[in-house]
Image (cartoon, rainbow, N blue to C red):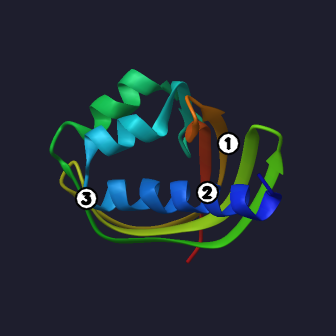
Amino acid sequence: MDSNTRREEVLAAEEAWLQAHLDVDIAAIDALMHPDYTIIWPSGRVVEKDEALASYDSGERHWDEAGIHELGVRIYDDVAVVNGLWKAKGVNSGKAFDYQARYTSVWIQHDGRWRLLVDRSKDIEA
């Protein structure tokens, strides 16, 4: 498979990740996560897959809008690194949010598809 095809697959996985968040589709989020998924929250806290999924399941999270921009993708065999800009607006645990963040996601081929292994972000000024 050529690098352009692999890049398009990774970008499609990024878009699916975004849409799953907008829909608060926990099953889709879970399916996109690698079994060893880890996220580093902007606070620096490291969270494993089960805790990350539970944070969506509270029913207290809602996105009014979200988008990914300025995407850069690098492919290394079965690993892809994506750097981008995430913008989101909504409510989490009763608190409104409207922010943007720079993020890095590491995707890995697993069971024949791209799955998110590591995700980290840093809030930035709008």
Q: Which residue is mark 1?
A: 106
Mark 1 element type: strand
Residue 34 vertical position relative to residue 95 in the rendered view, above or below: above
Which of 20/124 is in front? 20
Q: Quadrant of residue 68?
A: bottom right
Q: Which residue is mark 2?
A: 9
- Report the quarter where the C terminus lies: bottom right
Query: Which three-letter amino acid code belongs to the residue tagged 2?
Result: Glu
Q: Is residue 81 visible?
A: yes
Choose mark 2 or mark 3, whichever is in front: 2
Mark 3 element type: loop
Question: Marks 3 and 1, Cα distance to the nearest angstrom?
Answer: 22 Å
Residue that appears at 81% across and 58% down:
3
Residue 11 vertical position relative to residue 113 in the rendered view, above or below: below
Residue that appears at 17% across and 47% down:
60
Query: Which three-letter amino acid code belongs to the residue tagged 3?
Result: Asp
Q: Which residue is mark 3?
A: 23
